[in-house]
Every structure is written in C-alpha cells, then in structure tokens.
C-alpha cells in the first residue's frame, strides 16, 4: 500500500487556523485517507487531526516594535520548523498568511530543497496597501498563491506567479438578502458585543481602551449587556473584573452565533472579524491601536485611505474606523452612541456591508476552501 502523502501546513494566527482547518477538511474530502497533515496550527487545525510542532501563539505576532521582545523566540521557532522539514520532507508545503514567519521558512526551503517541493501560499500579502516590492519576493518563494480578495491576483501575476482568487470563506454561507438590524426599542437594554482581538499584544493595547469607552457609553445606556468574544488561545489574558458592568465571555462557536443574533452593536478590532460581524447584519465600530513607533513606520508605507476590509471593498467609509490617536475611549463611545441614536444609519451600514461582502464570493459559486483544495490537488498528483 502506498504511503500517505505528507502535507506540511503552517498557520500563524487565529484566522489562519480557521482557514487551515477548512482547507484540511476539503483536501480530505477530495483525496479520502491519502494525506497526512503535519505542521503548525491552533485549535481548529487540531480538531482536524493535526498535532502542532509548538503552540501557534508563539508566532502570533504583529507589528514592528511589538515583535522585537519576542524576536529570539520566533527565530528559534523558525529553526525548529526548518529542522522538522529537513528531517522528514513533505510532498507539499502550504503556508497561510503570516508572511513575517512563513516567508523566512520558505526562503530556507528554497535554499535547502530548491524547487523540488511545491510551495503554496494562502492569503496574499497586502502589497496593494504597502511595500509592493513584496509581490516579487512572493513570486520567488512560491509556486502558487491563493487570494481571498478579487483584485489581488494582478499584483502578483506580473511577476509570473500563478495566482488564483478562491473567495473568502467568511461569505460561504452568506444569503442574498440584507439582514435587518436588531431594533433597539425604548426600554430595551442595549446588547453590545466586543471583539478585542486574537493576539496577546493587540489585546493588551485595545482592551483597556475598549473598557473605558464602554464606561462612557454606559452613561447613556446604564442597563446595557456586554458580551466579549474571546479566542481560546488568548483567554488567559482577558481580565474583565474592572469593567463597569458584568461581561459574558464567549469562547464556543455555538454560543458565538447565539450572541451575534441578539447583538445591537459590535465594538471590534479591525481585520477579518469585521467580515464575520457583517454577515450577521450587526452594525459596528472598528478600531486599532499599536505602538507609536509602529504606527509612525506604517504611516510612511501605507497607500490606501481605509484599513477596514469592508471599506476597502466598498471604496467608501461604510464602517467607522478609529485608528491610533482616534482610538481613544471618548471617540469610540461617541461613535457608538451616534450609531445607536440613528436606526437608519445602522441599517444603511449593515446593507452596504453585505453588498461589499458579496464581492468576496468564489466566482464559480463553490466553497472557498474547496476552490483552494482544487488548486492544490495537482501538486499532489
């Protein structure tokens, strides 16, 4: 009997863990029991049967200054990953997002193995936002790039890299109709849901700001209920004991869906999570805050007017996004209160967000993970 083919997958953060798990499920569907999955991942990939080389949180870092205190640990994890690849070379390597870690591994792979092992990267580096020269580097390191956004392939194809828009899995179950917002009737307690992030560093920056903004908002809504969606990987750093009101911590998927169906408004970090919130028809305010030096460096690189993915797709300021200096308790509380006072504004935001999300569907109408798996299958033939 032929040995199983080894697929080495690296995911470096929570969103990549979800993508990796869905991709593993799709690859298994198309190949039966022919594949063995190894690599680095989180809870979702573990549920699909992969044992991670080390905890994914060790490499779930973002920013310039924020990474520096952890640089030695990350370098050790890169070496550990490369040693594992050298000891037992896989048939295919799939890296998911996290280019800071993954591209350093792929550089070693190219030096050590040449082009003998196919390398597929899933989620394009945001070259359309800053540092466009990374497109050329991506082409040098990868055999195939799978993108989540429809306008990304052209940035990489000019360098000869085979690139496929597979769709965004967040919109796989999205219906055609815009969901009506949950009305906030007079006398009904406000239900606010908070998404503080899935990386320890961003939670340390954002959670105190979110806490103080909720305190200010409570002056207008003293009976509000607060839920906080927490990723299991960072649950141990979430402390809500000093919040002005009780906070329900939510970690499980079934609870998450239940919470979103009863939420009037979301306060969230920017990123992929805003897409998920929009699929429920929940209006939101998005924010982000990083180390001042990181912010200074990014501002000299970035070339787009928006940070939020929905705003980027809509080419308009659909979702309020309060970044860096604007990400303070007063501005956040004011932005939330402004939306809550105007049901029409909340409904318009929800409708325009859904319209933007439709652009992220796979062109063939299949699941994004199935489309990604079909791109990978030829490399396993």
Image (cartoon, rainbow, N blue to C red):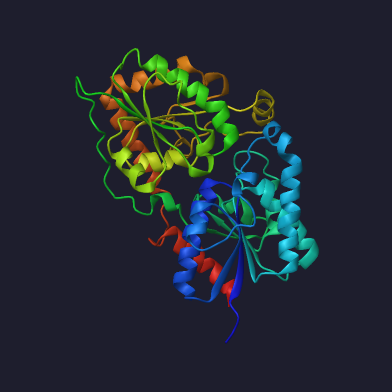
x and y, in percent, of residue 26 in the image: 46, 66
* Residue 68 x, y percent position in the rendering: 73, 35
Which residue is at a point 63% across and 33% down the rendered structure image?
302
Foreground residue among 202 and 327? 202
> Which quadrant of the view contains residue 191?
top left
- Residue 2 drawn above or below residue 354: below
At horizontal 41% and vertical 16% (from top left) the residue drawn is 215
- The residue most toward the right is 111
Q: Quadrant of residue 205?
A: top right
Q: Is residue 235 left or right of residue 366?
A: right
Going by the image, does 193 lie left or right of 166? Answer: left
User: Which residue sits at x=55%, y=62%?
Assistant: 50
Of 185 and 345, the residue lying toward us: 185
Q: Residue at x 70, y 31 (%)?
A: 65
Residue farthest top in this picture: 219
Q: Position of residue 1 (x, y in %)?
A: 57, 87
Please say if 16 is above or below 205.
below
Residue 136, x across and y down, in percent: 71, 52
Q: Is residue 28 above or below residue 280?
A: below
């Amino acid at each position: 009997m032929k040995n199983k083919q080894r697929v080495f997958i690296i995911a470096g953060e929570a969103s990549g863990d979800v993508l990796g798990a869905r991709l593993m499920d799709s690859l298994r569907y198309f190949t039966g029991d022919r594949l063995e999955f190894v690599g680095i991942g989180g809870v979702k990939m573990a549920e699909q049967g992969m044992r991670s080389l080390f905890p994914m949180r060790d490499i779930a870092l973002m920013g310039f200054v924020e990474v520096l205190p952890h640089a030695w640990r990350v370098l050790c994890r890169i070496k550990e990953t490369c040693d594992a690849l050298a000891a037992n070379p896989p048939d295919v390597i799939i890296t998911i997002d996290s280019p800071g870690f993954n591209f350093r591994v792929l550089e070693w792979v190219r030096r050590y193995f040449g082009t003998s092992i196919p390398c597929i990267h899933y989620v394009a580096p945001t070259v359309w936002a800053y540092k466009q020269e990374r497109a050329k580097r991506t082409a040098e390191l990868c055999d195939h790039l799978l993108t989540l956004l429809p306008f990304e392939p052209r940035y990489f194809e000019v360098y000869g890299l085979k690139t496929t828009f597979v769709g965004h899995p967040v919109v796989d179950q999205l219906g055609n109709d815009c969901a009506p917002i949950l009305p906030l009737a007079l006398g009904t307690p406000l239900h606010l849901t908070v998404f503080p992030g899935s990386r320890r560093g961003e939670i340390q920056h954002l959670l105190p700001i979110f806490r103080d903004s909720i305190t200010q908002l409570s002056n207008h809504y003293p009976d509000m209920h607060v839920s906080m969606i927490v990723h299991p990987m960072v649950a141990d750093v979430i402390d809500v004991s000093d919040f002005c009101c009780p906070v329900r911590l939510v970690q499980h998927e079934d609870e998450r869906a239940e919470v979103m169906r009863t939420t009037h408004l979301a306060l969230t970090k920017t990123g992929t999570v805003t897409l998920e919130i929009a699929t429920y028809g929940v209006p939101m305010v998005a924010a982000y805050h990083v180390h001042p030096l990181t912010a200074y460096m990014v501002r000299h690189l970035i070339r787009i007017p928006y940070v939020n993915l929905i705003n980027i797709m809509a080419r308009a300021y659909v979702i309020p996004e309060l970044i860096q200096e604007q990400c303070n308790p007063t501005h956040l509380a004011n932005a939330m209160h402004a939306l809550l006072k105007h049901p029409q504004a909340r409904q318009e935001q929800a409708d325009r967000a859904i319209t933007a999300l439709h652009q992220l569907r796979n062109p063939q109408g299949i699941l994004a993970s199935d489309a990604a798996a079909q791109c990978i299958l030829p490399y396993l033939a």
